[in-house]
Image (cartoon, grey):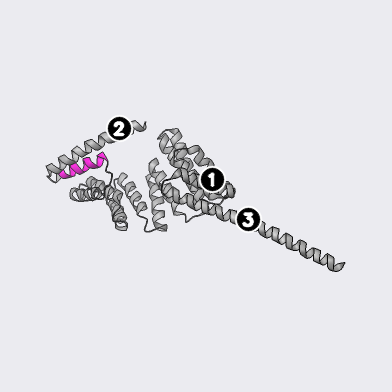
């Protein structure tokens, strides 16, 4: 009798072990598959195939409902589509699942910044800009070395016209990431607004040193040299930007044309002015179509 009972317990133990092991394997495989779907979504998003990316993020969440990362990425896609309500909703889901995730707070900051830019300089726009800064600060409180939060906070301060705080943010980014050419370019653009052209040019040149094909830095340097009345260097930078297929604005072409005028090259000046008028018309049509 004792042997029978003992054998029965062994059999029951084996059955329970098989069940638990099987369930563990089942849940592990679901979690693994969710990660694979998430990775596919990331790849599709990187190739701007946002609709299919959303499908794979949803598949990942179906398999693993407490998976914060797909919610965050879905929020970023909704932001790309200017669907700010859904963008914030999904990012808040991500934070609910992972309250100490600095990146998610930073991303909600980006959405609020974009909403602020859409509303413009009115009171609603300012409300969203302030919210953006609050979220960036929450991200930094979680991770004081999170350079991305400082970077986007710098952009938000710059767009609000708060130049001194913008400079502090971009300098912090450079302290954390000394080879961040975009931070140097933004820092230069703030100094340009403050009419500190020497500092602006120093920053633009550093950005170009880090990335010799950085068209935006050449374009900005061309404008700063123009403001400093160094017309030959202005021409050199603008022409390099054109060579690299930069999308110059009508203002850029006007400055380039005037720089050529100061250098007594009337033929090139005329060519730039004609291009400026064409670009100006395209800008006018694009603006009116978007309205």
Front residue (pair 200, 96): 96
Report helix, strand or loop for mark 3. Answer: helix
Q: Of the residues tagged 2 and 1, which is closer to the observer?
A: 1
Left or right: residue 251 versus residue 84 is: left
Q: Mark 2 = which residue? A: 285
Q: Position of residue 105 (x, y in %)?
A: 51, 47
Q: Position of residue 265 (x, y in %)?
A: 12, 45
Q: Which residue is pictured at 67% across the width and 60% down the height?
A: 21
Q: Mark 3 = which residue? A: 26
Magenta span of residues: 249-260
Q: Of the residues tagged 1 and 3, which is closer to the observer?
A: 3
Instruction: Say which label, 2 or 1, has the lower sequence index.
Output: 1
Q: Of the residues tagged 3 and 2, which is closer to the observer?
A: 3
Q: Is residue 264 above or below residue 30?
A: above
Instruction: Say which label, 1 or 3, has the lower sequence index.
Output: 3
Q: Disc 1 versus disc 3: distance between alpha carbons?
A: 20 Å
Q: Mark 1 = which residue? A: 58
Residue at the bottom extreme, as displayed: 3
Q: Which residue is pictured at 55% across the width and 44% down the height?
A: 92
Q: Position of residue 288 (x, y in %)?
A: 33, 31
Q: Disc 2 versus disc 1: distance between alpha carbons?
A: 38 Å
Front residue (pair 192, 255): 255
Within 10 Å of disc 2 (Cα), the crowding (few <14, some 14-19, many 20+) is few
Quarter of the picture holding the C terminus: top left
């Amino acid at each position: 009798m004792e042997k029978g009972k003992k054998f029965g317990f062994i059999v029951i133990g084996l059955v329970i072990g098989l069940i638990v092991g099987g369930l563990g394997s089942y849940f592990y495989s679901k979690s693994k598959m969710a990660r694979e779907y998430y990775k596919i979504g990331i790849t599709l998003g990187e190739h701007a195939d946002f609709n299919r990316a959303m499908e794979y993020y949803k598949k990942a969440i179906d398999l693993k409902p407490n998976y914060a990362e797909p919610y965050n990425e879905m929020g970023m896609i909704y932001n790309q589509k200017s669907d700010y309500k859904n963008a914030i909703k999904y990012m808040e889901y991500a934070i609910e699942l992972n309250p100490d995730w600095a990146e998610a707070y930073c991303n909600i900051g980006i959405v609020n910044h974009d909403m602020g830019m859409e509303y413009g300089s009115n009171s609603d726009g300012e409300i969203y800009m302030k919210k953006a800064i609050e979220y960036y600060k929450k991200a930094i409180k979680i991770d004081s070395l999170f350079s991305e939060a400082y970077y986007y906070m710098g952009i938000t301060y710059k767009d609000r016209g708060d130049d001194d705080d913008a400079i502090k943010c971009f300098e912090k980014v450079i302290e954390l990431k000394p080879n961040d050419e975009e931070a140097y370019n933004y820092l230069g653009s703030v100094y340009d607004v403050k009419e500190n052209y020497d500092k602006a040019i120093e920053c633009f040149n550093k950005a170009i040193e880090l990335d010799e094909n950085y068209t935006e830095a050449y374009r900005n340097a061309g404008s700063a040299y123009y403001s400093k009345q160094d017309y030959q260097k202005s021409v050199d930078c603008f022409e390099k930007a054109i060579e690299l297929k930069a999308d110059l604005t009508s203002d850029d072409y006007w400055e380039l044309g005037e720089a050529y005028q100061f250098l007594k090259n009337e033929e090139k000046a005329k060519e730039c002015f004609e291009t400026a008028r064409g670009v100006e018309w395209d800008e006018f049509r694009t603006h009116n179509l978007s309205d």
